[in-house]
Amino acid sequence: MRSTAVNLLQSLLPGVARVEKNLEFLKTNVGNLDGLVQGFRRGAITEIFGPPSSGRTTLLHTFLASATRNGEYCALVDASGNFDPESAEKAGLDLSRMFWVKCNRSNDKVQMEQALKCADLLLHGGGWGVVVLDFGDISPLWLRRLPISYWYRFRRVIEPTPTVLVVLEQEPFVRACASLALELQPAQPNWAGAHADFRILESAEVRIALKKPVVRNTAVFSAQTLEKVG
């Protein structure tokens, strides 16, 4: 059953094969983040966590846009079905190099289990530059119950490959299995307009604290609105 599914995924992306690990990092093009950590390490897990409206989606779109522009094939396991292809494309993501797995919306437990199975299948299939496991809207209550053996399993699978595994969450759960852990704080909005009740959101300042490795400096980037009204 598994080999059939893997063959199906590979047939959808002709020419994708396991490649040599010729570059150690994938650049993010996110503010000054690359200057602090060089990018996201291949063959390792990057953990991104923070509350809603902290800039997780913007950071992810920027990174995936950079990866697809550089020829990487990327897979997104969307546990809550919240990925918006139109917004991602406006942010520069090449959708022709993107494989989107949208889990059925039922409850957090079922969606979490579906997402884990899909991520396991993709990682074992190989050939991906980036695999994203988006648990951003899954309740931490369920993720706390997840055995840590899942993360050790994923880490062992990708270590000899050029794949970057990115895990998005509200709280840190990958912990020791992650080579890089980024904490996003609530974004600070920048408004345009003089009227107190009718202002337009122009951008938001996103601050990223490096929790692993511990770095005193904080990465900062500005998330611009895609469209302006009026």
Image (spheres, grey):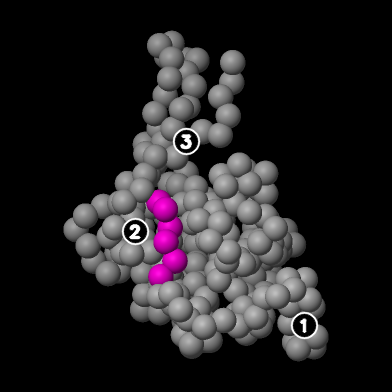
Between residue 126 and residue 77, name the one nearer to us. 126
Residue 168 drawn at (x, y percent): 50, 62
Q: Disc 1 vs disc 2: Cβ atoms closer than 8 Å?
A: no
**Residue for point 53% across, 86% down:** 157
The numbered mark at residue 34 is: 2
In the rendered view of the protein, which quadrant contains the C terminus? top right
Q: Is residue 30 above or below residue 130?
A: above
Q: Is residue 185 visible?
A: no
Q: Is residue 183 left or right of residue 100?
A: left
**Residue for point 67% across, 49% down:** 85
Residue 144 lies in the magenta-colored region:
no
Q: Which residue is mark 3?
A: 224
User: Which residue sits furthest top?
Assistant: 195
Q: Disc 3 vs disc 1: Cβ atoms closer than 8 Å?
A: no
| Mark 3 / mark 2, whichever is N-terminal | 2
Q: Which residue is mark 1?
A: 7
Q: Is residue 118 above or below residue 199?
A: below
Q: Is residue 45 left or right of residue 228?
A: left
Between residue 36 and residue 151, name the one nearer to us. 36
In the rendered view of the protein, which quadrant contains the N terminus? bottom right
Residue 86 drawn at (x, y percent): 67, 44
Query: Disc 1 residue type?
Result: Asn
